């Protein structure tokens, strides 16, 4: 510390015990080159008069080192306060204003002083002290002084625990100096202690005594360290604060609500805030969670737990039990750990029984099984715990063990109460139907409704899981509709309202996919962004839960003919996986559709290999057999074998498989000339409500069939319906895919009359990827903007309406038109459109 420039006349050294504040200041006072007066407080001389007395005595103790009139002035000060405190303060300040050289007044252990420091001599020196006086204040927390104004003026230097703590490099260097492998063990010791100097020393001693690095602080620190914490830290705190700290360090991480639960008193939140403000071995945690979380210094918390277990083992166990109940519905692993420490295995079993399906949904089957195995007998043999283990074994592929555990669970069912038995049956049925994919898919929805009704008798977690799994099952069947979307919204809301993060994230992600499959693209993208933001906010570890969001984004991008984005998002979905659910059939089908749409032979060949590998996986969604047939046919079509593709899907020609499958099959059959069968498929679609992209595709297929049959009125009516369905969500893929067959019909439709001129023009302007475009020399004679203008010129839009649609002025539009006429050799709008059509430019 230096005050040569005089700008910082106050230094505050604030850190908990054991950070070497006194050692630092003693070393500094010997080497700073200035006269230093030293004052250390004790708890027995902390009133205003005593503080005045000892400050004067400290200054007079170094008066012999001062020069000139200041020596006499300081020596003549009366340590006993007079009747007028203000006059006393002025006398001290007048004496110190004579300083010709710097003088430092170091006050150690200022936290032991009384609360009214501002009203005494020290407060006066803080506010009005002369430039030559440097105040150095050392305290275990922020001193009880009003320093805000001085900090604002920049006259205070703060030295906190972070500056006093050892760094990882310093920790490694210290270990090396003591003959240990600092490069290997240094970071571990620093992580365990946070650089707390006294804890570093404790760890160093333990290592020198031969204790392995991995167990240096287990099961408990040395008695001498425990005595230090008890005598130097806890005993010097007010009794309410020390009692709070012993309770609140039951866990290393704590929230305000947990503090209240551990103290069984609302004062817990206030005392936690006090510890935080005073830097009392507590720091805000930035890992991200719904509730603000704080972390105790790990070794300090361990020492406090050990001290409490020695003083009052019954209270220590009760506090672990209180922590278990706090986490029972929000963190099953933590609940189990705390319940076992508190001797409450029943609480652990209850938490597992009510939330095991939620853990499986989040991909935590392996850790869930370990939690069950930690339970002592007889709780480990409880039928519900055996069922949980059976489910975990099934997901791990160990069917023999799963069957054995399931039989043991069923044999003990009679010993369960009625409520637990119903919960047991409902959870098992939900797991088998919607996670393992067992049972009749057609009956799954009906059974799911019954299970959700049953779940209403049980905790919110089970009900939320029931909503989620049922909504997911209907979405993956390919026709979610309003019921599935409502179920998933209910699940998301229940998760949010009850702190069930797993359900909220998983159901929110699945809701994005349900909305996309249902054709509400804008809402799907918005919901997907919400789900991803929530996962980031709560540092969600299971990225597989977000796979539905990426499938939804890929689906939307495909139908909007943004193939690059679709490829990126669907690849992301496959990368993060879909455990613990069956492999994501919908995502695989859209990967194939995108690859086929590119027309790239290399990608199509790679897609076929991926398809074969995916088909060999187990298990699959119930919709996979139909989707697999359609996917294989699309690959055959992309390879140029339209007849073979149609033959593959002919068994689906009766329709009714799923909206997506029916629309794709209808178009494949139309291309193969099997128009009657194609119309059977589209007719099946007409009997139900379908997503807009399915309606668009189906209507275009019907329009082209009618156009080929010479039924012009029907063709235009179906085309108008198709563009009406496509426009709200910019569904372009069906138009691009049928571009060659649709071109003449679209041109005629603009003249026939339409309420969607701008959208038709945009479909004509929109270009497929370069590798599937026809390379024509004439294409390059027009700029991109000129091609846009030319496409709009074929409609009935006026020049002003075209300009407005393209966001350009009428004059700019006319300039583009003149350029088009010149390049095409046309004389007017009609001839330009005719020439461009003949050349295949539009």
Image (cartoon, rainbow, N blue to C red):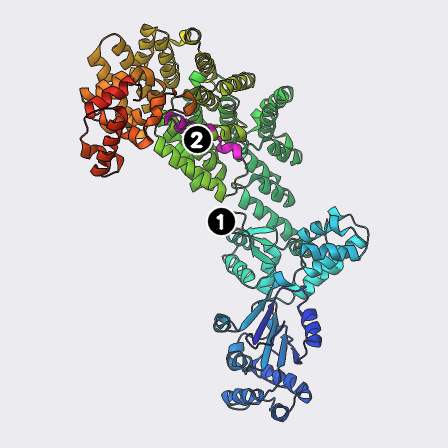
Pointer 2 residue: 565
**Callout 2: SS:** helix
**Between marks 2 and 1, how big is the CA–CA gap?**
36 Å
**Callout 1: SS:** loop
Choose the circle earlier in sequence order: 2 or 1. 1
Pointer 1 residue: 291
Image coords of residue 636 (percent x, y): 46, 12
Front one among 57 and 255: 57
Mark 2 closeness class: few <14, some 14–19, many ≥20 residues within 10 Å: some
Residue 89 lies left or right of residue 399; in this view the side is left
Image coords of residue 137 (percent x, y): 60, 73
Residue 325 lies left or right of residue 777; in this view the side is right
Question: The magenta stretch spans which residues?
Answer: 542-567
Q: Quadrant of residue 246?
A: bottom right
Q: Quadrant of residue 172?
A: bottom right
Residue at 64% in and 67% down? 236
Mark 1 closeness class: few <14, some 14–19, many ≥20 residues within 10 Å: few
Total marks in image: 2
Note whether residue 570 is visible.
yes
In this rendering, the answer to whether 83 lies above or below 364 is below
Quarter of the image for the N terminus: give it: bottom right
In this rendering, the answer to whether 163 lies above or below 615 is below
Image coords of residue 799 (percent x, y): 19, 32
């Amino acid at each position: 510390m230096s005050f040569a420039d005089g700008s910082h006349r106050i230094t505050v050294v604030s850190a908990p015990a054991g950070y070497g504040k006194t050692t630092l200041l003693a070393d500094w006072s010997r080497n700073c080159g200035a006269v230093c007066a030293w004052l250390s407080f004790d708890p027995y001389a902390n009133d205003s008069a005593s503080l005045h007395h000892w400050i004067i005595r400290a200054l007079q103790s170094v008066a012999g080192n001062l020069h000139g009139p200041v020596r006499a002035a300081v020596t003549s000060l009366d340590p006993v306060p007079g009747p007028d405190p203000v006059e006393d303060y002025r006398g001290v300040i007048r004496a110190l204003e004579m300083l010709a050289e710097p003088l430092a007044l170091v006050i150690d252990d200022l936290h032991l002083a009384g609360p009214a420091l501002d009203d005494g001599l020290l407060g006066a020196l803080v506010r009005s002290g002369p430039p030559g006086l440097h105040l150095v204040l050392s305290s275990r927390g922020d001193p009880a002084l009003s320093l805000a104004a001085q900090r604002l003026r920049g006259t205070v230097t703060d030295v906190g625990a972070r500056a006093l703590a050892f760094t990882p490099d310093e920790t490694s260097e210290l270990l090396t100096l003591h003959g240990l492998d600092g490069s290997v063990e240094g970071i571990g010791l620093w992580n365990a202690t946070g650089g707390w100097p006294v804890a570093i020393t404790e760890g160093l001693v333990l290592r020198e005594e031969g204790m392995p690095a991995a167990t240096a602080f287990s099961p408990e620190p040395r008695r001498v360290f425990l005595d230090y914490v008890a005598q130097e830290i806890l005993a010097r705190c007010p009794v309410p604060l020390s009692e709070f700290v012993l309770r609140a360090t039951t866990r290393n991480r704590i929230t305000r609500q947990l503090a209240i639960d551990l103290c069984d008193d609302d004062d817990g939140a206030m005392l936690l805030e006090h510890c935080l403000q005073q830097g009392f071995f507590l720091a805000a945690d930035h890992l991200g969670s719904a509730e603000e979380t704080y972390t105790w210094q790990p070794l300090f918390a361990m020492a406090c737990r050990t001290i409490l277990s020695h003083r009052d083992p019954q209270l220590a166990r009760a506090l672990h039990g209180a922590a278990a109940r706090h986490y029972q519905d929000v963190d099953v692993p933590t609940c189990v750990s705390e319940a076992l420490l508190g001797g409450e295995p029943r609480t652990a079993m209850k938490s597992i029984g009510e939330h095991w399906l939620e853990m499986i949904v989040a991909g935590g089957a392996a850790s869930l099984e370990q939690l069950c195995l930690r339970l002592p007998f007889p709780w480990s043999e409880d039928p519900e715990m055996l069922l949980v283990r059976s489910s975990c074994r099934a997901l791990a592929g160990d069917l023999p063990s799963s069957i054995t555990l399931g039989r043991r669970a069923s044999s003990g069912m009679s010993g369960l109460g009625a409520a637990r038995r119903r919960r047991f049956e409902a959870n098992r049925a939900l797991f088998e139907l919607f996670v393992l994919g067992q049972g009749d898919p057609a009956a799954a929805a009906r059974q799911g409704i019954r299970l959700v009704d049953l779940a209403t008798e049980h905790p919110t977690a089970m009900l939320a899981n029931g909503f989620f799994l049922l909504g997911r099952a209907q979405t993956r069947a390919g026709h979610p509709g309003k019921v599935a979307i409502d179920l998933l919204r209910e699940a998301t809301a229940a998760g949010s309202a009850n702190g069930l993060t797993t359900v909220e994230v998983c159901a929110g992600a699945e809701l994005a996919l349900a909305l996309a499959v249902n054709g509400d693209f804008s809402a799907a993208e918005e919901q997907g962004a919400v789900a991803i933001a929530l996962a980031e906010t709560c540092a969600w570890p299971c990225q597989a839960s977000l796979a539905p969001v990426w499938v939804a984004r890929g689906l939307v991008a495909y139908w909007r003919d943004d193939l690059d984005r679709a490829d990126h998002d669907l690849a992301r979905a496959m990368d993060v996986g879909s455990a613990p659910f069956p492999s994501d059939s919908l995502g695989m089908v859209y990967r194939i559709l995108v690859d086929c749409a590119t027309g790239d032979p290399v990608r199509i060949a790679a897609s076929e290999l991926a398809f074969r590998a995916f088909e060999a996986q187990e298990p699959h969604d119930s919709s996979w057999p139909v989707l697999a047939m359609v996917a294989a046919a699309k690959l055959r079509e992309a390879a140029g074998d339209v007849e073979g593709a149609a033959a593959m899907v002919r068994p689906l020609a009766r329709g009714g498989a799923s909206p997506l499958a029916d629309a794709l099959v209808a178009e494949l059959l139309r291309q193969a000339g099997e128009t009657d069968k194609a119309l059977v498929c589209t007719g099946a679609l007409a009997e139900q409500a379908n997503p807009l992209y399915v309606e668009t595709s189906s209507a275009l297929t019907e329009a082209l069939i009618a156009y080929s049959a010479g039924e012009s009125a029907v063709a235009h009516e179906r085309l108008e319906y198709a563009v009406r369905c496509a426009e709200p969500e910019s569904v372009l893929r069906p138009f691009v895919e049928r571009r060659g067959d649709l071109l003449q019909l679209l041109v005629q439709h603009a003249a026939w009359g339409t309420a969607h001129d701008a959208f038709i023009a945009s479909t004509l302007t929109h270009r497929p990827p370069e590798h599937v475009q026809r390379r024509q020399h004439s294409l390059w004679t027009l700029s991109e903007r000129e091609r846009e203008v030319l496409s709009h010129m074929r409609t009935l839009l006026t020049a002003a309406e075209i300009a407005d649609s393209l966001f350009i002025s009428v004059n700019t539009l006319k300039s583009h038109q003149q350029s088009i006429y010149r390049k095409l050799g046309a004389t007017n709008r009609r001839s330009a459109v005719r020439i461009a059509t003949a050349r295949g430019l539009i």
